[in-house]
Amino acid sequence: MKRITALLLSFALLLLLCACGANTASGGNASSGDAYASWGDASAGDAYASSGNATGVLSLSATPASSDEPFFCVTLESSRLYAFPASGGEGKLLVDKYANCFDQDGDSVLASFDDGSVARVDIQTGEVEEILPAGTQLFHRVHAYSGGFVGEYYSIRESKLYLCENGKEPVEIFTDRYFGDVRVIRDTLVGSDYSNGANRIIGYALPSLEQKWETPLDAYCYLSANDDDLLISNSYDGFISRVDPSDGSVANVSGAVYANDSVLYAYDGAYLVEGDYKTNFALYYLRGDERLTLDLPQAETTRYVASARDGKVLISCSASVEAGDYGWTTATTYIVLDMESAKLYIVDLNGLYSELFADGDFPVMDSSTARKPLVQNIYRFFCLDTGYGGAEPLCSTTHGAWLNIADKKADIALLAAPTEEEETYLKEQGVEVEMKLYGGDGLVFIGNSACGVTDLTLDEVRAVFRGEITNWSELGGADHAIHVLYRDDQSGSQRLFEKMLFKDGDVPDYEALGFKRLDEMSTLVSACLDDPYAIGYSIMTYLNDVYSNEALLAFSLNGYSATPENVRTGDYPLGTKGYVVIRSDEPEDSPARRLYNWFGSPLSDTFLSSCGITPLSE
């Protein structure tokens, strides 16, 4: 079992026993089409109205025998879509790109990806059928039906609903109304509508969108659907009711239901529900009058249903764990609830990428200062988030990292190309290297927003660093002397700056010009924050990852700002290239070689993009 399991289980498991008082919000049987028109006394068997419900704890048990059949679909490793057996273990990578959302339907799964594509994947064979090509539409939820799917898109400003029939382009539907909840079950689209002071749920036939029924409610309810159940729950009175999707008729569900219970999953008369803030949103297993608190890690833990199928629910339990100089990382335990047998057990989910260093043999990484945020994120992904451990990155500047590769103090490094001096040292040490391009970045000139200038030309930048332009007013800004900052000649950013700006080799004498030298990139950036009239330079991703301050100004060059997109297109004139480097004699299965080969994979491209770096290839 993973070390991460032991880590999380070291948290105190606070067993939240549910203390239930009498709840009088019980109603008589609802007639078809007019649910909850009136509420009377609780009838026999409606245990949510009584105070004598059985309570207790559903404890963790041993993991059952393994199964080879993929069961759960779940996203992990930067939202890669996997299928896992019910008992965990090695997962099957279904699609190697970022999945926004998915809907598992039997032995296939429908998934929407961040490139705007949608595909249906056969879980058994791994066969991928493209439904919509890249660039079509982003979806945040998808609901499969026999002839296609219904997709939801939402943002802070808008919410849209699309009908996507097989072989056709998505069509936006119900543009004149808003549904609070949307579910699809048995080729019926169900939406909850609370407009104009009315509460109702409405069913529409798919794909015709002909209204089949409308059921009024006298309270605001939550709508949920899973497997063959369509359910509504009332957050105020404490009830769960089952809805027949064919005609909208509602039948009360008897059992140990409390006010503020939210239904997460239902199967054959058993329910997984979530409590409210008074119980720290604890999860409960309900069957009849029995109400059991799930024995889950509770302290500082976020719990949610990651996947569910055929009466088994995969629950993700995540907690923030202190990681020393790396701040905090997230530790996750996966636990399965078997709704039929009422068993609760821990499973390990082993993904393709996170297992690269399962033996804790992560290589010693080094890098330039500008790449420090990136290598720290890589270390967090492979070592801290998995709990496998490994050597922390060195991050000893560009020149220092080249020396460490030559001296075999580092196994792999992220760097700019070597200088003649560094190439000579490698030869002296008898070390040959392999290096490949992994991503693009940008050299950025920075200052303070108080200077009054936002855009510079390359000629103007050269004139400033040659001492030919000395006042911000000459550039259209404040009438004040320009304070020029630079780095030491061994820093990667300084070498890059001189290589890109002074290609003819006519490098100015900064000291003779009275410019101020700062040995650390962080101190140069801080100086620009503190001095309204300073100018210096840094690396785009370093700034984006480390600094967020309105006073810090990144000048656009020749009218183009330093963004990954402008670097990719070449519009930004000072785009840069980064290389990953290993020694040529690294064995094929060495840790350094495995990480080297990881660069260029679809996941590494997603990872680089999330860090603000434009993925590139040779």
Image: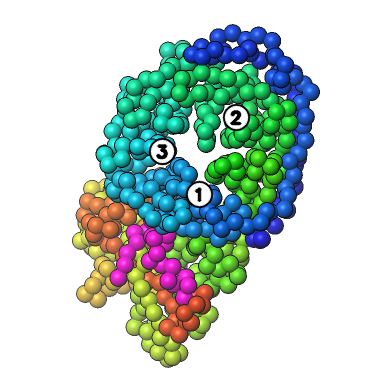
* Residue 582 included in the magenta stretch of the image: no
- Choose the circle earlier in sequence order: 2 or 3: 3
Mark 1 against mark 2, which lies toward the viewer? 1
**Is 212 above or below relative to 158?**
above
Q: Is the Cβ of the residue at disc 1 closer than 8 Å to that at disc 2?
A: no
Q: How far across and how far down the image is residue 305, in percent?
A: 57, 41
In the image: residue 266, left or right of residue 407:
right
Q: Which residues are magenta?
A: 593-618
Mark 1 residue type: Cys
The C terminus - image quarter: bottom left
Identify residue for label 1: 73
Give the spatial CA distance, label 3 vs label 1.
15 Å
- Choose the circle earlier in sequence order: 3 or 1: 1
Identify residue for label 3: 144
Give the spatial CA distance, label 1 vs label 2.
23 Å
Q: Residue at x 24, y 76 (%)?
A: 505
Any part of residue 98 in sight: no
- Choose the circle earlier in sequence order: 1 or 2: 1
Q: Residue at x 70, y 14 (%)?
A: 43
In the image: residue 98, left or right of residue 334:
left
